[in-house]
Image (spheres, helix red, strand yellow):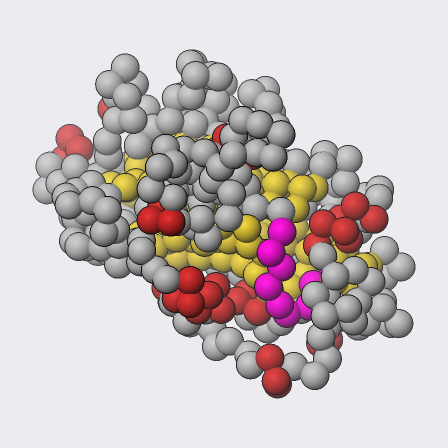
Amino acid sequence: MHRLPLSRRSLLLAGAGAGAALGLAAVPAAARPRPFGRYGSPAARLTPKTLYVDAHGRGDFTSVQAAVTAATGSGRTLVIAPGTYRETVSVDAGRTGATWIGAGEDPRDVVIVYDNAAGTPKPGGGTYGTSGSATVTVQADGFTAHRITFANDWLRADHPGTTGTQAVALKVQGDRSAFHHCRFLGHQDTLYADTRDLGAFARQYFAHCYAEGDVDFVFGRATAVFEHCHFRTLDRTDLSGAPYGFVFAPSTAGANPRGYLVTGSRITSEAPDGFYKLARPWVPSSDPTAHPMLTVRDTHLGPGIDAVAPYANMRDAHPWQSMRFAEYRNTGPGAAITVPENRPQLDRAEAAAHTREAYLGDWRPYARR
């Protein structure tokens, strides 16, 4: 998948590739005569604060960013018609309580995509860096998205001289951020689940979502719960041996008692067996006291995960053994405990502290429909 031609990448974004593993049938455009389906229209709004986005001009705006810019204040809802929106989008911290609804029946119907990487030159000089590469950046608290694909289709093979290959699909920093039935497509650093600053312990919830990538493709310092999600590691043709990459790279602040929790999920792979690590700790230069935390429980780990040594160091100064990594009741060939010291396990009493309720506290996005 690493050297896909443009036509193949277009099919992936449409849902004909690995993302089809969600098991949802894409709805042909010809079968969608009403762009907003059951979510009303500009003439019959869900609420007075609802704005409609349609790339073909049948809504209030043709781009997502234009609608975000117009949606001043809090509690605004965007209903986004099926289509591909090639743009970057930023939701600043003042636009709290926003909801984005993909108007299709499938998250593959609404795709927001761009192709900046960390090493991509900026028009005014310099490069974008990892954070600046994001297709969508959400800084506001209380953000919710339903049935949307967030993608970054930048490819290393198209830019052989670029050294900054991180290319973020979504960077989310706000507290109480929820994503239901969404997809996150990219390669390196696909989903950046983070916070606005070191002192903020932002809570985020991902339910029935799909994320794919190769290097550290779920990373950051948020308190994030991934429930009933599917993570897929991609094949690579630019490397000749393992490891191809790492699924998780948390950078949890040392003062934060809770980092990433993966529960009731599954990890599959396009790559050869054992070519991926489950995680490595990220201790960034901006926070040398970070103490990364990841708990993976009740999750099926496919053969793509290296069962003998599932964790690795990002830098030797911060060995994974000194981090807060743990597992509980995982299944599948990638979860086999062949070298016990390489797979820290929780006991039943310890596992009771690693639940969505414990991580999210009084915020209950899982109780909503």
Q: Please identify the quarter of the rendering in which residue 40 is found.
A: bottom right
At which x and y percent is residue 182? 53, 58
Q: Please identify the quarter of the rendering in which residue 176 is found.
A: top right
Task: For the N terminus, give its image quadrant.
Answer: bottom left
Kindly identify the residue that appears in the image at 77 percent across and 51 percent down.
66
At which x and y percent is residue 291? 40, 21
Kindly identify the residue that appears in the image at 75 percent across and 41 percent down.
96
Residue 322 in view (yes/no): no
346 or 163, nearer to the observer: 163
Q: Please identify the quarter of the rendering in which residue 103 is found.
A: bottom right
Task: For the C terminus, give its image quadrant.
Answer: bottom right
At which x and y percent is residue 123? 60, 35
Kindly identify the residue that appears in the image at 49 percent across and 69 percent down.
14
Q: Give the range drawn in magenta.
A: 79-87
- Secondary structure mainly formed by the magenta segment: strand
The answer to whether residue 82 is left or right of residue 53 is left
Residue 272 in view (yes/no): yes
Up/down of 13 relative to 348, above or below: below
The answer to whether residue 279 is left or right of residue 285 is left
151 or 275, nearer to the observer: 151
168 or 148, nearer to the observer: 168
